[in-house]
Amino acid sequence: MFRLYKCKETLDSYANADKKYEPHIQDSLFSHHESLIAADPKKREIIHKITRVKRFDGQEFLVYASTVEGRDSVYNRLHKFYRDNLGKYIELEIDKINTIDEAFVNNPNMDADFDIDGNLKTSGKSAFKTVIQVLGEHEAYSIPFSAKNLEKLKEKCKDKTSASVAKIEDTTSYFVSRENGITISVTDYESLRDGLFEELFTYGKKSPTKEERQRIDAMASRLSQTTKDEKQLPMMEVVA
């Protein structure tokens, strides 16, 4: 499985677990890319797509894909690096447990009585130490959906001309998605920002007209009926 790119939230999660983060190959490649264009005052990040994700618990977050581009200082060549799933990070699942502090109990100079909890009766020190145990890891989200957070991403979007005349490569694409589920295209930025998630997920835009609702509902009904008909088709018997 592809590892998400290194980010502050992942590093914080590893630090909280007292673990060292080991960069993967894509992390290393991106670090090299950043070093190539570090001296370019015009280097920039361009966002290609933004997805508004609704988790199973109802909370919504933003995930995006972008290209960081710039020129190196030696050959003046243009370098580009594309990254996806930005706004997601690896969160470690941890548990804190007590274990015997061997350095303490094996100290030859230590001569004292302990109570039933392992604490020294005299000083209150313990024969146990707390250690952090990593139970697993999961993907988490770092950018809650809000108009303010969306506007920050919008500043790096590719929308240069109106959607009616722009080439696809000159625009940013917008989507809504259920976590680990279907992704639906959204017609425009304003719909993504202001629309209700369920409305966007069903119709792909904010406040669709009555005619648009009827057309999309009819298409969905036909698709549903086709799926039912296909399920009812008899299985073909294979003759050896």
Image (spheres, rainbow, N blue to C red):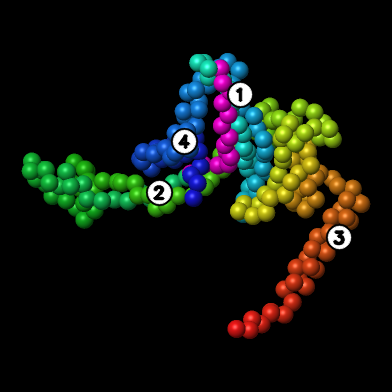
* Vertical position of residue 47 compared to residue 202: above or below: above
Q: Residue placed at 47% from the left, 29% from the top?
A: 31
- Asked where in the image residue 50 lies, by quadrant, the reply is top right
If you read the primary sequence from the N terminus, does the residue marked by circle 1 or circle 4 appear first?
A: 4
Which circle's residue, 3 or 1, is located before the other in the chain?
Answer: 1
Task: Give whichever of discs 2 and 1 has the lower sequence position.
Answer: 1
As measured in the structure, the alpha-carbon distance from the residue carrying label 2 to the one carrying label 1 is: 37 Å
- Camera-nearest label, 3 or 4: 4
Compared to residue 166, the image places residue 211 above or below, namely below
- Which amino acid, mark 2? Ile
Q: Secondary structure at mark 3?
A: helix
Q: Earlier in the sequence, mark 3 or mark 4?
A: 4
How far is mark 3 from mark 4, CA to CA?
A: 46 Å
Q: Quadrant of residue 167?
A: top right
- Residue at x 18%, y 47% (from the top left corner): 102
Q: Which residue is mark 4?
A: 27
Q: Disc number at residue 44?
A: 1
Which residue is labeled 2 in the image? Answer: 94
Residue 231 x/y as whole percent: 72, 73
Q: Which residues are magenta?
A: 76-90
> Which numbered disc, 2 or 1, marks the residue closer to the eye?
1
Q: Nearer the viewer, residue 81 or 65?
A: 81
Q: Which secondary structure dominates the residues rendered in magenta?
A: strand
Q: Quadrant of the C terminus?
A: bottom right
Q: Give the mark nearest the N terminus, 4 or 2.
A: 4
Q: CA distance from mark 3 to mark 1?
A: 44 Å
The residue labelled by disc 3 is 218
Residue at the far front in the pictured view: 240
In this rendered view, identify the residue nearer to me: 12 or 233.
Answer: 233
Looking at the picture, which amino acid does disc 3 mark? Ala
